[in-house]
């Protein structure tokens, strides 16, 4: 996977994903809590749940492409490892010979659509929902309450620095908490399997096999990396959003 290829996926899909998540949360907060400013934990969690559901429209295809790009080449040195897989799951295998196609987001997306239809891009939808809904339920109420601690009566909002710090703290904590669900989602959405690697019939089957074969610690793989990535991502997103961009976006829906 090249840096340019992954940057293109990020710019194309991560930006609308975050926009949908933040705007949807604000929309549901205002719908459920009149002006969206009251401190009502149940309604804040419900608004976060709605935001998590909405963002999956973009998140699931993005995660599918990301995982296949990151996984490309893993079996290249052992081509026999994927011999038992159907051709639709091996179309982007890379290798040193000229007979193998260089993987790209466009190629992967096209082949998934051609061989499996739109459902191919939404493989693991249930697992993605299972991860993103709890994340949003934890993240948004936590961020709102942390951000409220820096509320300035003169400006009517928290400072950029405080919103940034609140987004970092809430994002990293939520990311660590839902890491077990992210592990399951990644396993299910990885299309290429080597010899001896398990295939999963669903979330429950995946969780059972990971627990038996790798132990409970496997569910926290990558927790630190997720926190390091998501903390600044949400810190910047929330800091910029709370400058006033969110309010201007929501005016179009009034």
Image: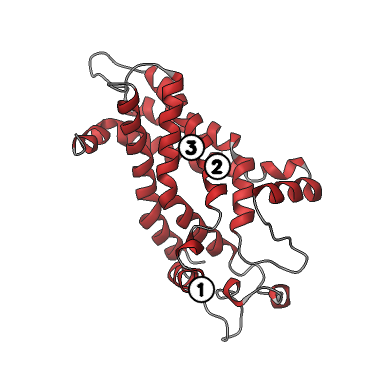
Quarter of the image for residue 34 reads top left
Residue 77 sits above or below residue 204 on the image: below
Compare residues 177 and 231 and report the one nearer the observer: 177
Q: Residue 82: where, in percent of width, then height?
A: 69, 73
Q: Could you tell me which secondary element the residue under label 2 belongs to?
A: helix
- Residues marked 1 and 3 touching at CB (< 8 Å): no
Q: Which residue is mark 1?
A: 115
Any part of residue 251 in sight: yes
Compare residues 232 and 254 and report the one nearer the observer: 254
Please tell me the numbered disc located at residue 231. Answer: 3
| Structural distance between the alpha carbons of marks 1 and 2 | 27 Å
What residue appears at the point 45 percent right and 34 percent down from the top-left corner?
49
Q: Could you tell me which secondary element the residue under label 3 belongs to?
A: helix
Any part of residue 223 in sight: no
- Residues marked 1 and 2 touching at CB (< 8 Å): no
State how many labels appear: 3
Q: Residue 18: where, in percent of width, then height?
A: 38, 44
Foreground mark, 2 or 3, reads: 2
Crowdedness of circle 2 by 10 Å Cα count: few (<14), some, many (20+)?
many
Crowdedness of circle 1 by 10 Å Cα count: few (<14), some, many (20+)?
few
Foreground mark, 1 or 3, reads: 1
Decide which of tag 1 and tag 2 comes sooner along the chain: 1
Q: Residue 24: where, in percent of width, then height?
A: 35, 37
Q: Which residue is mark 2?
A: 131
| Structural distance between the alpha carbons of marks 2 and 3 | 17 Å
Foreground mark, 1 or 2, reads: 1
Quarter of the image for residue 232 reads top left
Decide which of tag 1 and tag 3 comes sooner along the chain: 1
Compare residues 99 and 63 and report the one nearer the observer: 63
| Structural distance between the alpha carbons of marks 1 and 3 | 37 Å
Residue 222 sits above or below residue 150 on the image: below
Q: Give the position of the C terminus as an image quadrant.
A: top left
């Amino acid at each position: 996977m090249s840096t340019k290829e992954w940057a293109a996926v990020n710019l194309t899909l991560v930006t609308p994903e975050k926009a949908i998540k933040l705007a949807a949360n604000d929309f549901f907060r205002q719908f459920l809590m009149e002006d969206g400013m009251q401190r009502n934990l149940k309604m804040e969690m419900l608004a976060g749940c709605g935001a998590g559901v909405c963002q999956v429209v973009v998140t699931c295809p993005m995660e599918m492409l990301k995982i296949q790009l990151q996984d490309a080449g893993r079996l290249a040195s052992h081509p026999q490892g994927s011999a038992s897989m159907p051709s639709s799951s091996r179309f982007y295998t890379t290798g040193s010979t000229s007979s193998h196609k260089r993987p790209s987001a466009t190629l992967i997306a096209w082949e998934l659509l051609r061989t499996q239809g739109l459902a191919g891009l939404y493989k693991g939808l249930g697992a993605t929902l299972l991860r993103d809904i709890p994340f949003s339920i934890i993240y948004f109420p936590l961020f709102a309450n942390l951000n409220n601690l820096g509320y300035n009566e003169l400006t009517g909002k928290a400072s950029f620095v405080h919103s940034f710090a609140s987004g970092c703290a809430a994002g990293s904590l939520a990311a660590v908490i839902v890491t077990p669900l992210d592990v399951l989602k990644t396993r299910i959405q990885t299309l290429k399997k080597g010899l001896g690697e398990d295939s999963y019939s669903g979330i429950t089957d995946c969780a059972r096999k990971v627990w038996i074969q790798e132990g409970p610690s496997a569910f926290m793989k990558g927790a630190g990396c997720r926190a390091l990535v998501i903390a600044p991502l949400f810190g910047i997103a929330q800091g910029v959003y709370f400058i006033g961009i969110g309010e201007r976006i929501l005016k179009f829906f009034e």
